[in-house]
Amino acid sequence: MLPFYTKFKELCQTQVTGLGLSIFRVFFSLILLVEVAKVFYFRHLYFDPTPYIVEAELSFSLVLLVWLGVLFFLLIGFFTRTAALINYVLVLVFFSSFTTIKYHFDAALVGLSFLLIILPMANTWSVDSFLYQLQRPQRGEQKVRKVYYFLPVLLVLCLQYVDSFFHKAASAMWLKGLGVWLPASLPNQIYTAHSWLLNQEELITGLGYLVMLFELLFIFLLPFGKIRSWLALIGVSMHLGIVLTFPIPSFGLTFAGVYMLLLPDSFWSRIRGKVGSRSNSIFALHRFSWLKPFLVAVPEGGRVEQEANGYWRIKREDVKVKLLYFFTCYLVLAQLIKLLQAPLVINASEHLGTSTLRYYTAKAFLPLEVINAKLLGVTENLVYTGFEEGSYNILAVEYVAPNKETVWLPIIDRQGKASTYSFGRMFTKWSQTIGAYPQDTVQVKDGLVKFTAFWAAKHNIPLQDATFRVLSKETIVQFNWEEDFLQKQMNRPWREIGRLRWENNQPRLLLH
């Protein structure tokens, strides 16, 4: 007997309303719309060698606009499966293949975009389902398999949490309970300061340990239906904390949104009953007979006809269940393979004398790891695990006008916190610039040139003759709690470390 197959088959055979999946489709489509809209706004900074001056050989403007249109179709559930497929291809091209800007949120975008293709996300709350009911008003709502609610939870939450724990458990910062306190005490890592909370030593260290414990136990507690609501409450609170503190709100909102799939079936059924009775009175089907030329059928598998032969219907159902089961097992196996490179596993293998076996096993599966990461989003979760004690620099930029007036660029604010130009994907880009100083002046210059050229173009500042001050502020990373540590960091003075001079659209960086 296959492990857990009986329980899995039971989840597959249990039919529930698809309202939760449809609402999640709407929610995730909105997140993607925001992400793609930001890429469109910052497209010259992303793709141009020198924004607006030396433009990229290929213009992605039209493709991004088409993508936004595809996401609108996905949002309203019109030609949903086709829109999901096109979106997945574009996610692979723009997010999975990024090399200069590696953003940890991309893994979730890839995995969820893939699931949008294979899961019945438009059985209700969609134009497709409305047109389907016009065609077959007597059939009512198309139910979905209960297991479909758990696949996004498994891919985005369970597997990511397990991997995250194996990295955190080898981090001195997390083992001391400082995994929440320290990142929230570094100005360039946040956009809002919560000094009162950070100054409560027992509370903030307890939250650090709670995060680790939650990530470890989540996958084991998930099968117990009576505590899923509590798991959702803790998980949503944790990720909303990320949204309200760190400049990666899309990441936090998406993970928090996945928890809606853990709400009980009775909740969605009640919502479905209330919304359904109202919509039936407002949108009487006979009023929309003129839409029949656009009719589409979108039951669970994209097929309306009933199987004539009961035997083949049963066989077809059995094949579907097995395919879903093996796909789920593959996801778990793919993450386990990735864990072979986690620090905790490496340390344990050295202690047990199995380092060679671990090394060659990981090496043998390396090509598969790349495919899993690129196509399914199964990768390592290194969010806030790579801090090392020491003194570091925060970089900011200030424009000096010809009349000597100055303008602070919205990358890092005057306190050192993340600003408009360093949210989400751009947070990663500017962090690369900060991390390169002072060793890699080439990468520092590249970051400064791109951001200043982009800002200048947006504010109609000619770069025939322009000067930007490059400022630095020291920030300390330490693995011991200290009261008012964040405020002390923000109060540190800025010092000028150089100037970026633009003359005839040519940049020249002079560092002291």
Image (cartoon, helix red, strand yellow):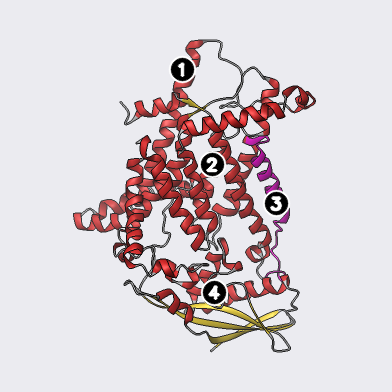
Q: Judge whether 366 appears above or below 298 on screen.
A: below
Which residue is pictured at 46% across the width and 54% down the height? 239
Front in this rendered view, residue 448 or 172: 172
Displayed quadrant of residue 280:
top right
- Write down the residue under mark 2: 114
Q: Is residue 369 left or right of residue 142?
A: left
- Write down the residue under mark 3: 63
Query: Is disc 4 surrounded by few (<14), some (14 to 19) or many (20+) residues within 10 Å?
Result: some
Q: Judge whether 47 appears above or below 284 on screen.
A: below
Indicate the amino acid at tag 4.
Gln
- First along the sequence among labels 2 and 1: 2
Picture quarter with the N terminus? top left
- C-alpha separation, residue under disc 2 versus residue under disc 1: 26 Å
- C-alpha separation, residue under disc 1 versus residue under disc 4: 59 Å
- Write down the residue under mark 4: 443
- First along the sequence among labels 2 and 3: 3
Which residue range is magenta in the image? Answer: 51-80
- First along the sequence among labels 3 and 4: 3
- Label 3 residue SS: helix
Which residue is pictured at 37% across the width and 35% down the height? 225
Residue 418 among magenta residues: no
- First along the sequence among labels 1 and 4: 1
- Write down the residue under mark 1: 315
- C-alpha separation, residue under disc 4 versus residue under disc 2: 34 Å
Indicate the amino acid at tag 2.
Phe
Query: Is disc 2 surrounded by few (<14), some (14 to 19) or many (20+) residues within 10 Å?
Result: many
In the displayed orientation, state which residue is furthest to the left: 352
Q: Are marks 3 and 4 in contact (CB under 8 Å)?
A: no
- Label 2 residue SS: helix
